[in-house]
Image: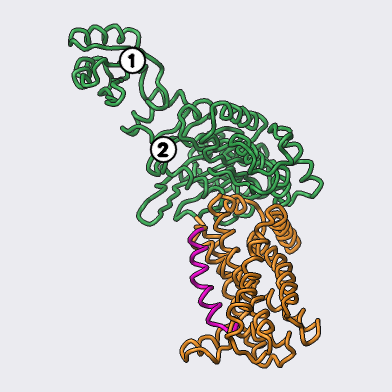
Chain colours: A green, B orange
């Protein structure tokens, strides 16, 4: 590692000078460095967003801590988000999702740690961060008395777009979000779904390359939620980087390229939806009992088939467990339960949902 | 930098003025209360109050103008607490706009509202016998001082609203600190008639100084040292509460 330090230093200085990665590489090789050394130096290095291999990490967070009184809202949170991706922060209420979003959008100062958004440090350079991010917070932040159009034009002008550009951009977004008919109405007359759409439009007014969406679909009916999902996916397709928070496993599964699971202020897992489902291991077998009080007997009957101790949901009269191969375990489970004299109304096997993932990771259900 | 700050403030003033136009009750209610005070004090208490200003309405009306902008200033805190509650402030703070624009915009809009309310109350006063004894220009200066004093109080209210962050609490709290200040002053009755402890307080109450100046300018008597005390208090309040309100705005979590 010591021999490669000069390489790192050289790359950093050359970067600051404005050389391209290719030029730096050529000059290093012509200076007699082995390609292997350069490669290792860059690979080993993971602490600095300025380095070439980090350049695609548009959001970069390291060892972030934040406490409110005795409550530690974030504990050593480190993460990075690739440019142009959708990343979901998944966790129950109070997990620290909103705290993290508020720090990344400069609304809150962390106690310690580093956070860079779009290459700018959120503590040292908040005004630059504000120019490259859009935020749609948990509650809809619109002026109820102004019309939809007036809201958009106001926010556009506060981003210092020219008057003409503000008018043009507001019109564009009203069309894009299907709000043109309601444009001249005061926001207080809008439905929940319309408010959410206008709120999202407001956060897009200056075409920010990075978008933070804090529980964008909470409280929406399924149809409005679906519309919003499509909008979010279109935004990512057009190159925006999106970090969203959600309590809904389904939402993270549908939208996100990468999911970061957070609980009690700590990141407990990360990966694609499939990666996380693999952590549960195989399929989930779910047994619905005729008599709810049979739960413990049922667990005893099937535990030999399960990879981990089965879960019992008392209220629903449901026993579930993960198994390597659902279809063969299913018939065996029916036989075992029958031998034990337990009546069942239904037995199914399914691919694990993120609810199962959360249960497997934390030992408790989300929420 | 200054250019964008000014344009940010203008945008926020516009936002608040549109609210007044769409919700005229905001102005109507803030006008009904002082008009009611004028009528009640003149016709109910007026006969029992001895003043050196001749007709009681001539004593009372300048004071009512001061009282009106003080009660109006409480709305600053209420409005900001409402913005916090609805998450509006989060959005504004995430924008690359001037730090002071949200607060200054609201307070300037309220100052513009105060101009209308002052004109209205003066007209009501004139109908029931109030007379400007000493030239119209002096009365304009008096109105200007009232607006400035209201402006300073709005910053106190803003700091409280952003600290408390609860609409009802701000409303009640505002009532608790403004009401005694207003009554233990020279607004309604001459301070000489008050009990000693209260009198000392009332004599040094900044509200009394301002009310005395406004009264002197409209009756044509000497403003004396009250004008200097008034300006001193206004400057002190602005120096303390503008930075305090802005720093509270930044620390909202």
* B172 left or right of A269 in image: right
* Picture disc at residue A315: none
Quadrant of the image containing the N terminus of chain A: top left
Q: Residue at x 64, y 49 (%)?
A: A143
What residue sits right under mark 1 in the picture? A324
Q: Which residue is drawn at 53% across and 41% down?
A: A214
Q: In this view, does B89 lie above or below A367?
A: below
The chain that hosts pointer 2 is A
Q: Is label 2 on the same chain as label 1?
A: yes
What residue sits right under mark 2 in the picture? A92
Q: Earlier in the sequence, mark 2 or mark 1?
A: 2
* Residue A192, horizontal then vertical, whole percent: 58, 37
* Residue B71, horizontal then vertical, whole percent: 59, 69
* B148 left or right of A59 in image: right
Give the quadrant of residue B70.
bottom right
Q: Does the magenta stretch include residue A29?
A: no
Q: In this view, does A121 lie above or below A364?
A: below
Near mark 1 (Cα within 10 A), the count class, few <14, some 14-19 or many ≥20, is some
Boundaries of the magenta span? B168-187
Give the quadrant of residue B61.
bottom right
Q: How far apart are marks 2 and 1 (CA)?
A: 28 Å
Question: Which is more toward the observer, A262 or B216?
Answer: B216
Question: Which is more toward the observer, A258 or B163?
Answer: B163
* A354 left or right of A51 in image: left
* Residue A211, horizontal then vertical, whole percent: 60, 40
Does dot 2 land on a helix, a strand or a loop? loop
Q: Residue at x 45, y 35 (%)?
A: A247
Question: Which is more foreground, mark 2 or mark 1?
Answer: 2
């Amino acid at each position: 590692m010591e021999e490669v330090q000069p390489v790192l230093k050289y790359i950093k200085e050359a970067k600051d000078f404005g050389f391209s990665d290719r030029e730096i590489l050529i000059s290093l090789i012509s200076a007699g460095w082995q390609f292997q050394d350069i490669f290792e130096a860059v690979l080993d290095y993971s602490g600095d967003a300025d380095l070439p291999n980090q350049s695609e990490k548009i959001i970069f967070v390291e060892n972030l801590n934040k406490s409110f009184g005795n409550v530690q809202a974030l504990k050593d949170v480190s993460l990075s988000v690739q440019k142009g991706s959708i990343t979901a922060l998944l966790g129950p209420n109070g997990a620290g999702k909103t705290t993290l979003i508020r720090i990344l959008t400069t609304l809150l100062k962390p106690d310690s740690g580093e956070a860079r958004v779009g290459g700018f440090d959120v503590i040292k350079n908040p005004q630059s961060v504000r120019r490259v991010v859009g935020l749609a917070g948990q509650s809809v932040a619109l002026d109820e008395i102004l019309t939809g159009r007036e809201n958009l034009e106001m926010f556009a002008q506060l981003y210092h777009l020219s008057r003409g550009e503000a008018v043009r951009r507001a019109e564009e977004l009203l069309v894009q979000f299907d709000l043109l008919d309601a444009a001249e109405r005061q926001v207080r007359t809008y439905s929940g779904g319309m408010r959410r759409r206008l709120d999202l439009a407001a956060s897009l007014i200056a075409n920010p390359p990075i978008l933070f969406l804090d529980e964008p679909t909470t409280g929406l009916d399924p149809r409005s939620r679906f519309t919003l999902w499509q909008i979010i996916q279109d935004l990512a397709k057009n190159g925006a980087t999106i970090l969203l928070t959600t309590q809904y496993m389904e939402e993270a599964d549908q939208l996100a390229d990468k999911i970061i699971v957070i609980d009690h202020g700590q990141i407990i897992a990360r990966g694609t939806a499939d990666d996380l489902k693999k952590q549960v291991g195989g399929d989930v077998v779910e047994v619905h009992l005729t008599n709810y009080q049979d739960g413990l007997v049922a667990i005893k009957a099937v535990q030999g088939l399960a990879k981990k101790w089965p879960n019992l949901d008392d209220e629903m009269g449901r026993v579930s467990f993960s198994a390597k191969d659902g279809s063969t375990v299913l018939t065996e489970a029916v036989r075992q339960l029958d031998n034990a004299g337990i009546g069942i109304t239904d037995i199914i096997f399914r691919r694990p949902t993120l609810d199962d993932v959360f249960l497997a990771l934390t030992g408790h259900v989300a929420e | 930098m200054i250019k964008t700050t000014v344009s940010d403030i203008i945008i926020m003033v516009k936002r608040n003025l549109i609210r007044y136009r769409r919700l005229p009750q905001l102005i109507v209610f803030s006008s009904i209360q002082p008009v009611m005070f004028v009528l009640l004090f003149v016709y109910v208490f007026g006969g029992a109050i001895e003043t050196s200003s001749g007709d009681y309405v001539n004593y009372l009306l300048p004071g009512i103008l001061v009282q009106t902008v003080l009660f109006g200033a409480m709305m600053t805190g209420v409005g900001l607490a409402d913005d916090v509650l609805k998450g509006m402030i989060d959005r504004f703070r995430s924008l690359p706009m001037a730090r002071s624009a949200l607060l200054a915009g609201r307070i300037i809009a309220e100052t513009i509202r105060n101009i209308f309310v002052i004109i209205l109350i003066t007209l009501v006063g004139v109908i029931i016998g109030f007379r400007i004894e000493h030239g119209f220009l002096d009365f304009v200066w008096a109105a200007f001082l009232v607006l400035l004093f209201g402006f300073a109080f709005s910053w106190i209210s803003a700091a409280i609203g952003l600290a408390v962050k609860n609409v009802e609490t701000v409303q009640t709290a505002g009532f608790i600190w403004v009401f005694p200040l207003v009554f233990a002053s020279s607004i309604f009755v001459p301070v000489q008639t008050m009990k000693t402890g209260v009198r000392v307080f009332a004599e040094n109450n900044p509200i009394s100084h301002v009310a005395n100046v406004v009264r002197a300018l409209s009756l044509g008597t000497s403003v004396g040292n009250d004008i200097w005390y008034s300006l001193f208090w206004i400057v002190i309040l602005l120096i303390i509460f503008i930075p305090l309100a802005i720093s509270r705005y930044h620390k909202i979590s």
